[in-house]
Image (spheres, grey):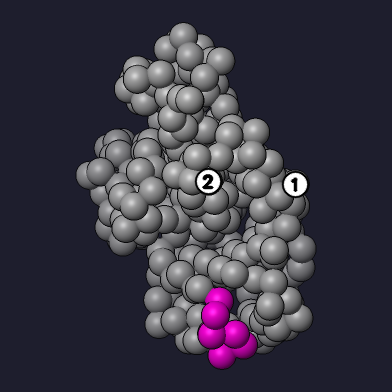
Amino acid sequence: MSKIKIMTDSSVQLTPEEIEKYNITVVPLSISIDGKTYIDGVDISRSDFVRKMNEAKNLPQTSQPPIGRFAETIKTLTKDGSEVVGIFLAKALSGTIDAARQAAEIAGQSDHVHLVDSELTDRAEGFQVLAAAKDAQEGKSIEEILKHVDEIKKSQKLRMMVVDLKNLIKGGRLGALSGKIATLLNIRIELHMPNGQLIVAKKGRGKKFSKAFDERVLADIEANKDRIPEVGISYVDTPEAMEELADKIRAINPNINVLVQETSPIIATHAGNGAYAILYYTE
């Protein structure tokens, strides 16, 4: 029976220990800041990225891994006859999964590479990747792995708070007029990603809106506390506040594993300073 290997992209939220323990291959995205290109996680860290983003003249540009890099990775993973399950950030956010598909064709391994649109990113993508990697180590089949990933995907939630719309406006994600109004009125927005599509769920003003957002999410976690095994909290530049939020989740159910980490450049670029997301799924 052929071995099954797991591949993902660097927008995923995983710890170095998880990547090593479950033998996960992470293909890095590329980042361009004022004309200089970096490889995500290779020659620029997440914290360095945020600092450079704030110092940059222009909004950074992120792009999917070059097809050549993808193709070489796929050749390496499949040269011993292995099958590959590739789980990537939502197609609505990036062309990464399409690049992976083209790379598999170039590598002549289309029949041995099974691609999944996570329909999310960050720790939500990580939940799917970890499930697949654990299943692979347990010797489960491709069909069993893909079914498990799909089950997690269907119950996942991403709840994101954007407190500064400047980057969203610069990136063209909001129309110029609505962007100006939002800035003047100190508008914050709550984002969801149902079925892989980024939507504005609610709009409000100031810190009271963010507090109400936290309370709604915590109430949902409370209601499902015995069915939620893990929660991810990802942020741009607010580590202390996010640890406080994590403690509130742990108080609800100490058995919930909560991972608090900085988000990836592709999310930080558009979400901007102060943004954070809470990601979880139910069993």
Question: Is 39 situated left or right of 174 in this image?
Answer: left
Q: Position of residue 199 (x, y in %)?
A: 73, 54
Residue 281 location, quadrant:
bottom right
Q: Position of residue 35 (x, y in %)?
A: 31, 36
The front one of 77 and 51 is 77
The front one of 147 and 1 is 1
The amino acid on which the numbered mark 1 sits, given as a three-letter code, is Asn
Badge 1 element: helix
Would residue 253 be counted in the magenta stretch?
Answer: yes
Q: Is residue 139 above or below residue 228?
A: above
Circle 1 sits on which residue?
Answer: 195
Q: Position of residue 41 (x, y in %)?
A: 30, 47
The amino acid on which the numbered mark 2 sits, given as a three-letter code, is Asp
Extreme front residue here? Answer: 1
Q: Position of residue 205 (x, y in %)?
A: 69, 78
- Kindly identify the residue that appears in the image at 54 percent across and 80 percent down: 255
Circle 2 sits on which residue?
Answer: 135
Work out whether residue 188 can be spotted.
Answer: no
Reading the chain from its start, which is encountered first: label 2 or label 1?
2
- Kindly identify the residue that appears in the image at 69 percent across and 72 percent down: 227
Labels 2 & 1 near each other (Cβ < 8 A): no
For the magenta stretch, what is the residue range? 250-256
Q: Is residue 99 above or below residue 137?
A: above
Badge 2 element: helix
- Kindly identify the residue that appears in the image at 31 percent across and 50 percent down: 20
Would residue 53 be counted in the magenta stretch?
Answer: no
How far is the residue under mark 2 from the one under mark 1? 24 Å
Work out whether residue 85 can be spotted.
Answer: yes
- Kindly identify the residue that appears in the image at 46 percent across and 18 percent down: 103
